[in-house]
Image (cartoon, rainbow, N blue to C red):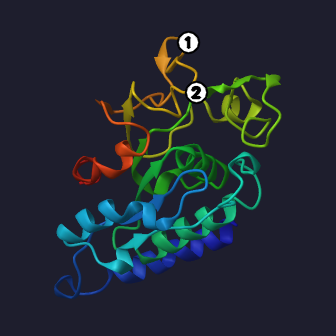
């Protein structure tokens, strides 16, 4: 894997050698959808990126996980592969040699895992987590008294799961931002949005956190301008 990442960096440097008139030099963007989501979920964000001059080649939208069984998806194995491939390809095509990662819901913790596990942290300029459960979901229980599904298990989102404990404190980019809501039907599905007194969508060491009154999917659909502002 390290060989693959090194090859991507060489490719990125080759792109950077192009004449300035041949390109607009900016980070490539990776958009990681949530559990049972799809690349099309990013329609508003993609429209905003293109409005600001990004091209299709600069926008990467991996499709990961089962689309029909939310409880079957976790953060280890086949779910990781499409996200890792997208990040490596984005690095290879980025004029700057870096990428910006915008995530929704479980896509945030999954992308964080991929960045942490594969040594991609140096290549991530900005990381934006929208409606993530970085501190866990009370609807999944508290590990090891968790709900018996993959999504809530060892590699899942139960509060205090070994996966989340291993992710805690990791830095995902040069700049880290969260977008959250106290009206989020998923993160606040138990009636409690916080873990240890901190909103579960907040990311440790973040540079900023913005709170809206939208629901879980409204946070994705209605904050496109803010998302792009955060990676500029």
Q: Quadrant of the C terminus?
A: bottom left
In the visual, does 185 lie left or right of 223?
right
User: Is residue 17 or residue 134 the one in the foreground?
Assistant: 134
Name the residue located 28 percent from the left edge and 48 percent from the top edge.
Answer: 222
In the visual, does 196 lie left or right of 126?
right
- State the CA–CA distance, disc 2 to disc 1: 9 Å
Q: Is residue 164 above or below residue 71?
A: above
Give the quarter of the image for residue 77: bottom right
Residue 196 is tagged as 1
Residue named by callout 2:
135
Label 2 element class? loop
Label 1 element class? loop
Q: Quadrant of the N terminus?
A: bottom right
Residue 3 is tagged as none
Horizontal and vertical percent for residue 208? 31, 32
Name the residue located 83 percent from the left edge and 34 percent from the top edge.
Answer: 148
Q: Is residue 138 above or below residue 61?
A: above
Name the residue located 53 percent from the left edge and 63 percent from the top edge.
Answer: 38
């Amino acid at each position: 894997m390290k060989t693959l990442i090194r090859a991507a960096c060489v490719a990125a440097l080759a792109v950077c050698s192009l004449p300035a008139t041949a390109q607009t030099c900016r980070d490539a963007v990776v958009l990681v959808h949530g559990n049972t989501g799809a690349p099309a979920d990013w329609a508003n964000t993609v429209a905003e990126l293109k409005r600001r001059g990004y091209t299709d080649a600069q926008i990467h939208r991996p499709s990961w996980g089962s689309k029909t069984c939310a409880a079957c998806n976790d953060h280890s194995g086949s779910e990781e592969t499409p996200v890792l491939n997208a990040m490596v390809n984005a690095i290879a095509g980025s004029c700057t040699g870096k990428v910006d990662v915008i995530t929704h819901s479980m896509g945030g913790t999954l992308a964080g895992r991929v960045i942490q596990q594969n040594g991609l942290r140096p290549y991530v300029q900005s990381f934006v987590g929208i409606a993530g459960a970085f501190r866990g979901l009370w609807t999944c229980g508290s590990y090891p008294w968790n709900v018996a599904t993959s999504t809530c298990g060892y590699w899942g989102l139960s509060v205090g799961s070994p996966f989340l404990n291993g992710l805690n404190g990791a830095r995902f980019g040069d700049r880290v931002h969260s977008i959250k809501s106290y009206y989020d039907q998923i993160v606040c599905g138990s009636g409690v949005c916080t873990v240890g007194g901190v909103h579960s969508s907040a990311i440790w060491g973040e540079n900023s956190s913005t709170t809206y009154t939208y629901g879980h999917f409204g946070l994705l659909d209605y904050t496109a301008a803010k998302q792009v502002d955060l990676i500029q």
